[in-house]
Amino acid sequence: MKLYRDEAVVLRTRKLGEADRILTLLTRTHGQVHAVAKGVRRTSSKFGARLEPFSVIDLQLYNGRNLDVVTQVDTLAPHGRAISGDYGLFTTATAMVETAERLTEIEREPATQQYLLLVGALRSLAEKVHPSSLVLDSYLLRALAIAGWAPTFTECARCDAAGPHRSFSAPLGGIICTNCRPPGAAAPAPETVGLLGALLAGDWGHADVSYERHRTEASGLVAVYTQWHLERQLKSLRHVERA
C-alpha cells in the first residue's frame, strides 16, 4: 500500500453500498482525487461528519485499485456546518464546488491555485465576510482567470483599444469597443463594468459599496461568461439566491 497525505476540500459525496461513501476531493497538491470512505455512514464512524461537502480537511489515503481509500481525517475548517444551515450560502457554495470540479476534472493534475482560491471563497461564505453573490461572482471570475480565461474590463478584448468601453461579449473575452462590437453584445452600465473589474481584482472596498442593480447586472454577465467558457451549463447556478 502506498500511503500519502494532503489537504483537501470535499466537493461532492455519493453513497456506496450500505455504509460507504465515494468522495470527490480537490486536494492541495494532488489535484482532483476520487476516494472511498469506508463505513462513514454508520453511527459508530469516527470521521463521517468530517467528510461533509465544503469542509476543508487534512487526510491520509492509500492508493487503491480503482479508488483511493481514506484512512485518517482531521478537520481544518468545518465550513460545511455553517454553509449547510443557510439555503442561500448552500446554493452559492454548491455552484462554487461544481465549478471547481469542472475546472480540475483531469484527475491528479496539480491545481494548487484553484484549491487555495476555493478555500478562501468558502471561508468568506461561512464567515459572511462579504455578500454571498459578490463572493460567488468574484470566485467565478478568478477561477476562470486561473484556468486561462481571464476577462478584460478595461481595454477592448479584441483590439486592445484603451477604455472605457460600453459593450460586453463573453465569446470575445469581456469588454468590447464600438468598432469591435458584435451583434447582440450586452451594454452594461459603467458602474457594472467597474464592479466586474473590482471582483476580478479582489477589490472588496469597491465591491462592498456597490448598488444592488449593478450587482444583479454583473451576476448575469458572470453567469454567461462562465457557462460560455465551460461549454456547458452549471446545474447549480440556477438555484443560487442572488438577492
Image (cartoon, rainbow, N blue to C red):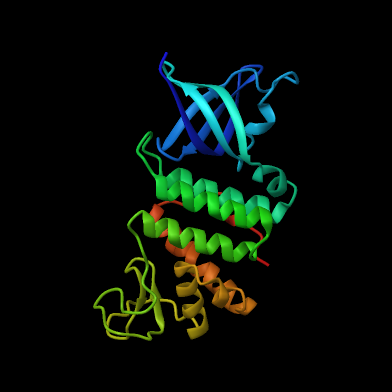
Quadrant for the C terminus in the image: bottom right
Residue extending farthest to the top is 1
Q: Which residue is drawn at 44% across and 60% down?
A: 142
147 w.r.t. 109: above or below: below
Q: How many labels does the image show?
A: 0
Name the residue: 53% across, 63% down.
137
Q: Residue at 48% across / 73% down in the picture?
A: 198
User: Where is residue 131 drawn, in percent x and y?
Assistant: 65, 65
Q: Can residue 169 be seen in this view?
A: yes
Q: Position of residue 44 (x, y in %)?
A: 74, 18
The percent coordinates of residue 27 (x first, y second) are 46, 38
The quadrant of the rendering that contains the N terminus is top left
Figure check: 229 above or below 14: below
Q: Does residue 239 appear in this view?
A: no
Residue at 64% x, 76% y is 212
Q: In this view, does 215 lie to the left or right of 147?
A: right
Q: Where is residue 207 in the image (x, y as percent from the top left)?
A: 56, 74
Frontmost residue, 6 versus 154: 6
In the rendered image, which quarter is residue 228 located in? Answer: bottom left
Compare residues 73 and 94 and report the one nearer the observer: 73
Q: In this view, does 229 lie above or below 39?
A: below
- Nearer to us in this view, 229 or 88: 88
Horizontal side of residue 90 vs 188, given as left or right: right
**In terms of image quadrants, where is residue 15?**
top right
